[in-house]
Image (cartoon, helix red, strand yellow):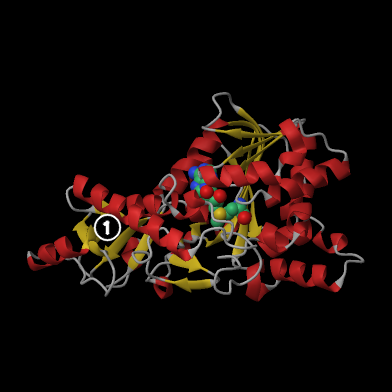
Amino acid sequence: MPRVMDDAGAAELSALLQERVRKAIAEAGGWLPFDHYMAMALYEPGLGYYARGGAGIFGTLPGAAGAGSDFVTAPELSPLFGAALARQVAQVLRLGGLDEIVEFGAGSGALAAQLLDAMHAAGVPVRRYAIVELAGALRQRQRQRLARFGAQVQWLDAWPRDPIEAVVVGNEVLDAMPVKLLHFDGQGWFERGVAVAAEAHADADAGEGAAAPAAGRGFVFADRPSALRPPLAERALPGAVLEVHPQAEAFVATLAGKLARGAAFFIDYGFPEAEYYHAQRHQGTLMCHRAHRSDTDPLSDTGGKDITAHVDFTAIALAAQEAGAEVAGYTSQARFLVNCGLLALLQGADVRTVAAAQKLVAEHEMGELFKVLAFTRGLALPAAGLLGFREGDRTHTL
Ligand SMILES: C[S@@+](CC[C@H](N)C(=O)[O-])C[C@H]1O[C@@H](n2cnc3c(N)ncnc32)[C@H](O)[C@@H]1O
């Protein structure tokens, strides 16, 4: 997929975004919590990474200069991802007598197309496929990609006012929600925020704990004492920098609270709490992606690259449960897709199709790092449970 934006255009947008971030920092008194910075870097209207909606964000090919994509997600990798997930979605639609699917963070619209095609082929009626997408430019892209489905696909500007009776899906949406950063210096906890480089220098002189800026960067990290603690804080090593996910948890709590009948499936990279906050991972999981290359410096190239953190699935499951939903399954993507019949879908497929699908389930690719978490509400499940978790359910590890 070619990139629509040339480098000069991208640089101009980045300069505008940086100016806006500087203003936000000034208005906040010289220090912006990292989650505010991340929200602007990704979603500031017209300027943030996703808000620009560049055609190169999603795709399959590593980007040579000026072409290709920034990262690959499962629905972009293989349509069989959607075809297998569709079997799970169909099971819940039938169980609940439902005819609506809601997708959060639909990216290029690939998963929506795969699910709708599969439902059509299986003769499962879908009255409405509703998409909630934060980035306006991506909504436009989705409209083009999904035009062939007509009025069946609708975009919601906000949370539906009525209770949700639907199957909800979200692939790699939780990892794109802004996180807070917490730093443990061996004695106390600090919230890590963002300051403008020159001012941070002055603050550092005044002993406020700002790090020295790297060359060519306008922003630096700066720490403030905080009452916030990550899960398992007592295990943290001096120097640890860990993420916590209040926005993703609030999002899931709202969804679980609004869900009256149906199920929600979130697919993403992440771990249960004990693994997430293990001493070995004491520098957290924050990563940036651009053109299939990753780095760990979210303060450079603001708006020009993705910023993401792994999902703490224990926190997500608890948020859903505390809001009244029942956790109905948690397992690896590989297990989930195989349980949903991926292998049967591959019967007779050509070598390319098999190779792409293999990446969805291979342990060293997406199969093990990616997990699927499901929660339900108002649904009587069969004794064997949901299709995708029939073998290898790991809910007990959360
Ligand atoms: C990493 S992309 C994944 C896109 C797509 N699901 C896929 O798998 O290719 C994250 C998507 O989530 C959207 N997003 C992030 N936070 C959101 C929220 N609170 N509500 C709806 N969409 C959101 C982003 O704009 C983007 O489309």
Q: Is residue 232 left or right of residue 25?
A: right
Q: Secondary structure at mark 1?
A: strand
- In the displayed structure image, the side of residue 317 where residue 261 appears, left or right: right
Please name whichever residue, 261 or 209, is drawn nearer the observer in this view of the structure: 209
> Residue lying farthest top?
162
Image quadrant where residue 209 sits: bottom left
From the image, which quarter does the N terminus lie in? Answer: bottom right
Inspect the image, locate mark 1, and give the three-letter code of the amino acid beneath it: Gly
Residue under numbered circle 1: 193
Which residue is at the front of the view, 381 or 352? 352
- Looking at the rendered image, the quarter that the C terminus falls into is bottom right
Q: Position of residue 393 (x, y in %)?
A: 67, 58
| Name of the residue lying farthest toward the right | 348
Kindly tell me whether residue 30 is visible in this rendering.
yes
Residue visible at 60% across and 41% down in the picture: 326
At a point 69% along the width and 50% down the height, the residue shown is: 111
Return the x and y of residue 33 as percentages of the image width and height: 28, 52
In x, y percent, where is residue 239? 28, 72
